[in-house]
Amino acid sequence: MTAVMNVQNAEERPADERKYKMIAENVSVYYGGIHTVKNITMKFKEKSVTSLIGPSGCGKTTFLRCLNRMHDMTKNARVEGKILLDGEDLYSKDVDPIYHRRKVGMVFQKPNPFPTMSIYDNVAAGLRLNGVRDKKILDEIVEDSLKMAYLWDEVKGDLKKPAMELSGGQQQRVCIARALAIQPEVLLMDEPASALDPIATQKIEETILELAKEFTIIIVTHNMQQAVRVSDYTAFMYLGNLVEFNETKKIFTQPQNELTAKYVQGQFG
Amino acid sequence: MTRLIDPSIKKLSGMMSEMGELATQSIMLAIDSYLYGKNTANQVHQISNEISKRYFEVADLTFDIFLKYQPVADDFRLIRSSIEISYGFSRFGRYAYDIASVREVFGDITECDKSWLIEVSDKVKTMIKDSVLYFAELDIRKSVAMQENEEFVDKLYKQRLPMLINSKDTKCALAEALVLRYLERIADHALFMSDAINYIVTGKHKLPKQL
Amino acid sequence: MMSSIQKRAEYRSLFKHNVRGRLIVDKIAMGIVLACVVIAIIPLGSILVEVFKNGLAALSIEFLTQVPGAIGTGQGGIGPAIQGTLIIIGMSSLIGIPIGVMSGIFLSEFGDNRLGRTVRFFNDVFMEFPSIVLGIFAFLTIVLLLGHFSLWAGAFALSLIMFPIVARTTEESLKLVPLTYREAGLALGLRQWVVTFRIVLSAAKNGMITGILLAVARISGETAPLIMTVLGSSQFFAGFDSPMDALPLRVWRLSLLPYDSAQLQGWGAACVLIMIILAINIGVRYYFATKSSFRGKLLYRIMGGKKQ
């Protein structure tokens, strides 16, 4: 509970001197021929939190997964358009997706720590399996990641404990630490708190706000109050289209598009 | 699709309209008491209490809605402004009572020069009716009219007061000064309310200079 | 409200009310199920009892370590048979397990297409081939090619029996691992094969081990293929190229002899075979139970208990 006081409000952070970290240009996704994400262009500033909202099936998770090329492993999925990370197109032919997935980390909806591994092994998994062997460095990075995920104090006594023995909220923070351990620059989160109880949700939100001082975060959420609390910018998607993209405060007090107004007020969805 | 919040918003709007009606009524009565010599202080007092009662009910309802429904966008602006608007209505009631008390305290003042008062009262009556209409229809053109009227009332008030300082008839001068003061305050609050209603429509707090 | 209160009462009265009757039916059904279980276990139990009853008497150091004596005497033992069984299980496993696991991985991770479906179909058909046919096949290919019976041929035949089972169970175990772990692995920037081998495989460990142990137990008892490939012998290990004895073979040969002493030795051999299979099972499970991170009672884990 104490950390809430220390968290900087989004409006106090330096606003528009921030550059664009990631730009999605005319991105479309086809699932077996059906046009599910339609020509979306969005720009994400560095050190900011952007939330994607919209009714179920509007394509926000599909779009999110384009940002780290997760659709490469989906059958029948075809992606068009460009995703520029620091100016480099992730989807160009000479880019190795593996390399870029290390720059763009992902946290999933249901906490999924590797079941056969301890907390330490989970967080270190991305490092070890990518060739980092030095125990001292691993220890350092694991500690740093767990601290960033607000979990270090709770687990530092027993890092060898199996990750599956933690509570849901703690497991999700292990997953966040695991994603952070590979030192990404952008963090994608797919409804990270939807499977958690209110206290755990609060902790995750504190974590997100703290991380936003360093990383670019893009989060898909169904919970509009969460979007208001946590994000600087909000994008509203409907039926695969980007309907409105603006500062969160504006979207939730004075939306420009009527559809947006209807959705955020709960008139459909 | 009716949402959970809709009945509460409807109730809120209903209460606000009631307050508006009551406020209009009280001010008409009060001004007439001064202009035509009727002692309506008790009646006005009663109405003003009714308005106050509703003011607290509106306050409770607004915070209840915030607690339960966490409104956003249009709903949010409506509910946020409701607090300021209902305060405005309660002030109308209060000043109406003050005006009616002047009649009560000073006695019959029908023989005083009422020309200025009649002009100002008419404008103020218009402003009050306008504010209630503006809230009901959310027609932003009314806010321009409101601005003009308030400036008019202000101008007349500033013109008339110095004249009263040199007046021979203390009773009339005092009574007129008090009533003018109250009317000027009512106009001010009406403008304040119109700003709040502007916020509902435009999402901006300041009235735009040109419309 | 959709229906009125009366309607609801009406609906409620439609349900069956013979609670007592239904409890009785429940108990009867349970009884039938238990009876079936007992009927199924009785033969198993009685087999074990018979084997140990008759076979334990034959066990002795001499029995376990000596070559078979002259036919009809009670002398000698089944030493070569034991050695042969162990060697041939080892060799077949070395061939069959890796091939089976790799096929299983292919079918599960990359087999969602025509090729995969074809392979799976043939795998299933192959699993049901009579083992004697596989023995004859091994005979025709290895034995005739090399010109003599040998352990190679036996291992070949047994691995043919082994790998479809291992492939199937590996595939099923891998499929049980939720997609989300693969996604998490990929999202960490790991290559596909690293994800499969280091993450998915270790999560599927338990199921795979069960499958492998099943396959091992199966081949330990196969007799027909061995007849055509290792033939049997009365000597200890004489090279991979020579014929060799094995416990199922020895049991078969001993059981055909009319002498009581031979019969006794047969029971003893059967007893030893069952004990070997049991030992392999417990041993492997013990090894993995101690390595696992699930900290429960040891016996519970060996018997395959999972974390609640």
Image (cartoon, coloured by chain):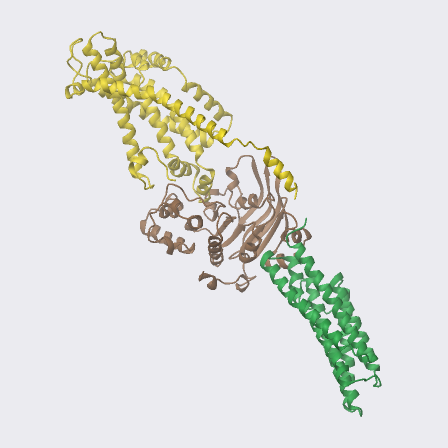
Residues C44 and B211: in front is C44
A59 in relation to C150, above or below? below
C73 in relation to B210, above or below? above
Chain coloured yellow here: C
Total label count? 0
Chain coloured green here: B
A181 in relation to C30, above or below? below
Is C153 situated left or right of C186 in this image?
left
Q: Residue at x 28, y 24 (%)?
A: C277
Q: Tell me the quarter of the image containing the N terminus of chain C.
A: top right
Chain coloured brown here: A
Residues B59 and C26: in front is C26
How far across and how far down the image is residue A206, in percent?
Answer: 48, 57
Q: Residue at x 47, y 49 (%)?
A: A103
Q: Residue at x 63, y 62 (%)?
A: B62
How far across and how far down the image is residue B159, in percent?
Answer: 78, 84
